[in-house]
Image (spheres, rainbow, N blue to C red):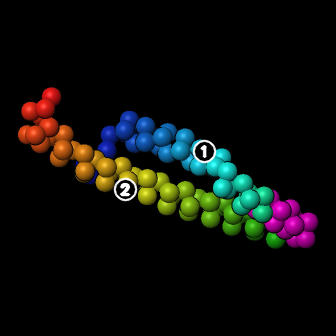
Amino acid sequence: MEQWPNWFLDALKLRFDASALTAQKQYALFPVHQKLAALNDAIRQQADDGLLVLLSEWEDTLNHKHNIEKEWLYMQGVQDGIRIIYPALHSSDYRSIR
């Protein structure tokens, strides 16, 4: 399980992206999105251009960090699931049922 084929990693990435999009649409996040939009507007109105560039770079870097963390957690979940399911699928009890 150390080396994953590229097609498998691509499939997992697509699934992760679809799940992330669904998560963004959750009703519980609506107030958070509203607050972030209000804060973003306030910052843009009060900050000068130099600070806006710096804040934009900071935001991009933070988002990238969060995405890496989420993908890592997702892959850990997949690996854990495989470690749980694989032995069950290859046990003699499972083979005798089929």
For disc 2, the marked residue is 76
Residue 21 is tagged as: 1
Image quadrant assignment for residue 32: bottom right
Question: Does residue 48 appear in this view?
Answer: no
Mark 1–mark 2 CB contact (< 8 Å): no
Residue at the farthest right position: 45
Tell whether position 47 is magenta.
yes
Residue depicted at 50% across the width and 57% down the height: 70
Question: Does residue 18 appear in this view?
Answer: yes
Residue at the farthest top position: 98
Say what secondary structure mark 1 lies in: helix
Q: Is 9 on the left or on the right of 91, as rendered?
A: right
Q: Is 70 on the left or on the right of 42, as rendered?
A: left
Q: Amino acid at mark 1?
A: Leu
Residue depicted at 75% across the width and 67% down the height: 55
Residue 89 is tagged as: none
Image quadrant assignment for residue 17: top right
Q: Amino acid at mark 2?
A: Gln
Considering only vertical position in the picture, is 18 above or below 41? above
Instruction: Tell me where the magenta segment starts and ends, as one range.
Output: 36-48
Residue depicted at 62% across the width and 64% down the height: 62
Residue at the farthest front position: 97
Residue 56 screen position, x and y as percent: 74, 62
Nearest the viewer among 48 and 93 is: 93
**Secondary structure that dominates the magenta span:** helix
